[in-house]
Amino acid sequence: MAEQKTAIVADAPHPVAQTLRMLWRDKFALAAAVFLLIVLLSALFGPALLEGVATKTNLRGRNAPPFDFSQPWYLWLGGDALGRPLLARIIVAAQNTMAVAVGAVLCSLAIGTTLGMIAGYTSRMASQVIMRLADVIMSFPSLLLAVIVLYMLPPSVFNLIIVLAITRIPVYLRTSRAEVLEVRERMFVQAAKVMGASSGRIIFRHLLPVILPTLVTIATLDFALVVLVESALSFLGIGIQPPEITWGLMVSQGRAYLTTAWWLSFWPGLAIILTTLSLNLLANWLRTALDPVQRWRLEIAVKKNG
């Protein structure tokens, strides 16, 4: 009997390998993950490798058309109004765009989840105070609040992260509170209370792992929204300013040439669209993969084709 149990355990696939197999089976999610990996690598290494190329002007190549494969690879998407290569600038601009999106989502996720779990598990008074704070933030339209604050603060990556993080905190706060209110009545939480576990240990050791998959899925979708908001602010001219570059700022700079050089706005706009689309596709896959009730559908597909 013991040998049979050992054989079953040995045959069980590693969770990481099983997850990668499930991702491989979903070609849309796989393509989204590969594209996001390329964007991440561009954000990490692009400025170090291509910043000199991306900022070098060439007035002879002003508004150079795309698909001229006789030129170096970084000019294949054409040049901007100062002759700077668009492909190199898109790669370099990925760092600022991703820095704002990642920073805002992580800050709002950490703060909102912590406050939501406290509101859902502790006293009624603390819950009321925290929820009224969320109501105050939600009473202002997020884009309008960002516009007002950024008119008063100097434009920078840090200020943009803080403003966007504040506007997204209520999403995680309300979600985590609702999840905790349901999970705290389960038997394993009651057992932890009986055994004398502190409130902090119950919140972060027992409640957080249960609600985290839902929050990760929301954060993935929220990431796409923050990218769009940052692009909108840069387009309006109150986001990050030159000589720094973001995808939204590149779209804004190219709108004066839409009738004569459409590619100045098209390529950075396409980068925004593909990034948000990839995030949405990956979030849909994560919603199934992280949900124990739905995960079996992906596991069965892997076993049938494995």
Image: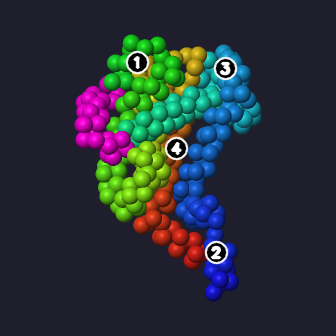
Scheme by which the image is coloured: rainbow
Q: Determine contact: label 3, label 4, CB under 8 Å.
A: no
Amino acid carrying mark 2 in the image: Val
Reading the image, the residue beneath label 1 is: 150
Q: Magenta region: which residues?
A: 117-144
Q: Residue at x 69, y 18 (%)?
A: 56
Residue 40 or 55: which is nearer the viewer? 40
Tell which circle, 2 or 3, labels the residue nearer the N-terminal end: 2
Q: Which residue is mark 4?
A: 274
- Mark pair 3, 4: CA separation: 24 Å
Residue at which label 2 appears: 9
Q: Quadrant of the C terminus?
A: bottom right
Q: Position of residue 151 (x, y in %)?
A: 38, 14
Of pointers 2 and 1, the one earlier in the residue sequence = 2
Q: Earlier in the sequence, mark 4 or mark 2?
A: 2
Evaluate whether residue 135 shows in this view: no
* Mark 1: amino acid: Leu
What number is the disc on residue 111?
none
Q: Nearer the viewer, mark 1 or mark 3?
A: 1
Q: Position of residue 274 (x, y in %)?
A: 52, 43
Q: Give the residue furthest to the bottom.
A: 1
Mark 3 = which residue?
Answer: 55
